[in-house]
Structure formats: C-alpha cells, structure tokens
Image: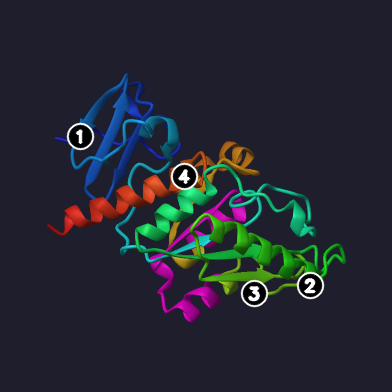
Amino acid sequence: MHAPHAPLGESPPNGASVCAAYHSFRVCFSGGQKDDRKAFRVSADRPLCHDLTLTSMMKPARRRPRLVLLDRDGTINVERHYLADADQVELLPQAGAGLRTMQRLGLRLAVVTNQSGVARGLITPQQVETVHLRLRELLLAEGVELAGIYTCPHGPDEGCRCRKPQPGLAEAAARELGVDLTDCVVIGDKPGDLELARRIGGSAILVRTGYGGTTAALHPAAADFIVEDLGAAALVIDQLLASDSLEGE
C-alpha cells in the first residue's frame, strides 16, 4: 500500500527530503532509504535527492513529451540585463550537457523568449539576432541543435499574444514543428514560464538558475518540478520517459 501523499504546499510525510508521485509510480528518499514502487533509475554520481523537488504530489497523466520549450536568459545562458552583446553570451554550467541528453532522448528543443528590450529601445532586432546566432554556435559546439528560436519583442503593456505567459510563441513553435501543445515541457526560471506551461497544458520544470531561486521561494507550487539546472531537468525528463515505457509494458 502506498504511503499517503502530502497535501499540496506541505512537506512530504515522515521527514522525506524528496517525495515524488507521477502517474502510478512513487519514489521517496528519507534518510538515504528508498521506497520504490516503479522507481526512478538514478545514477550514483547524481543522486536524485540533490537535484529534484516535486512540488505537487500527484499530477494528471500526460502524453509522452516530444518538444521542450526553453526560456533563454537565466535558463540556458547566464542572465544579463537586456543582453545586446553577442560576446557576453555564456552558457550556464550543465546547459550543454542537459540539452544534449534531452536531444538524445528524442526530444526537439526550441527557445521561447521575451525580449522587451526591443520595445524599450535598449536592444535592436539585429542585436537579438546576433545574440541568437552566437547562442546557436555555442550549443552546436556542445552537440546541441535548436529546432527554433521564437522571440517576442513587445513590451508588457502592448497586449500582444506572444509575450509569455501568453501562448503565442509556444503555439508558433508547436505548429511549425508539428507537435501538440500538450506534448510540450516548458523549462524556465521565471513565473511566466510556469504559467505558460499551465496555459498550454504542458509540464513545467523550474530551474534554480537565473531568477529561479527567487521564483521557487515565492511560487513553489507553480512548477511540477524544481531542479538545480538543465542537467537535472534532463534527469527528470529521462525518468518520466522511462516510467512511461514501464506503464506500457
């Protein structure tokens, strides 16, 4: 019999540092002991309890993910206020490795990014394009190829449909890449990324990089998973895909 789930927003029972439930499997870590129902397979050098917090004890079943929608600044590359200089594009630690793992798992990768600096006159569209070219170069050097980069250049008061958390960028990516919105995983460091996932019916992974630490403190229940970085996010997706395969056996 499964241990009871903690209510949303409360700590897991029995002092567990991590309690995870998704579909019909459950993993608990408490004092180094594992309660295994259909357990995550976790590598010894990357223990799950250091990387993963599942904020919601039970999530509805979703279809197998096919597309990862990634925030840009603070998620893939180092956060720089209104990044305009391509020379300042710097990948975050574990970004290349994590995205490479997601790609190996058969997922396509697309960036969805708000760039209101264009509307504010702080960045030109040409500078945004140059930054994106540099980002692609750095990721290609890591063995990662983006399927697309989708950008909203509008300000927060313009009422557009593409500025996250509005779904316009996600809809464009899904349409062009032939993917249903509910087959998407959204990864980011800001509340707008998590709200985007909710609006399109996808899964939300919050990374603690960039503004993610603050977002986790203020909105812990808004994400399906809270992880340290893209490397840990890839681990979560890997195990969800593995559990999906187990469910079909």
Is residue 88 magenta-colored? Answer: no
Residue tagged 1:
36
Q: Given the image, on which type of amino acid does mark 2 rest?
A: Gln
In three-dimensional space, the C-alpha distance between marks 1 and 4, rounded to whole angstroms, equals 23 Å
Quadrant of image for the N terminus: top left
Looking at marks 3 and 1 on the same chain, the residue that comes earlier in the sequence is marked by 1
Q: Which residues are magenta?
A: 170-198
Give the alpha-carbon distance from disc 2 to disc 4, as whole Å: 31 Å
- The tally of labels here is 4
From the image, tell me which residue sits under label 3: 161
Residue 19 is left or right of residue 190, and the answer is left
- Give the main secondary structure, helix, strand or loop, of the magenta stretch: helix
Give the residue type that dot 4 points to: Gly
Q: Looking at this view, is 20 or 74 the one in front?
A: 74
Q: Which mark sits nearer the N-terminus, 2 or 3?
A: 2
- Amino acid type assigned to the residue bearing label 3 in the image: Arg
Q: Which residue is mark 2?
A: 126
Rounded to the nearest angstrom, the CA distance separating label 2 from label 3 is: 22 Å
Residue that badge 4 annotates: 231
**Which of the two discs, 2 and 3, sits closer to the camera?**
2
The residue mark sitting in front, 1 or 4, is 4
Return the x and y of residue 211 as percentages of the image width and height.
65, 43
Q: Secondary structure at mark 4?
A: helix
Q: What is the three-letter code of the residue carrying label 1? A: Asp
Task: Name above or below for residue 184 compared with residue 212.
Answer: below
Label located before the other in sequence (1 or 4): 1
Residue 108 screen position, x and y as percent: 43, 66
Rendered-image quadrant of the C terminus: bottom left
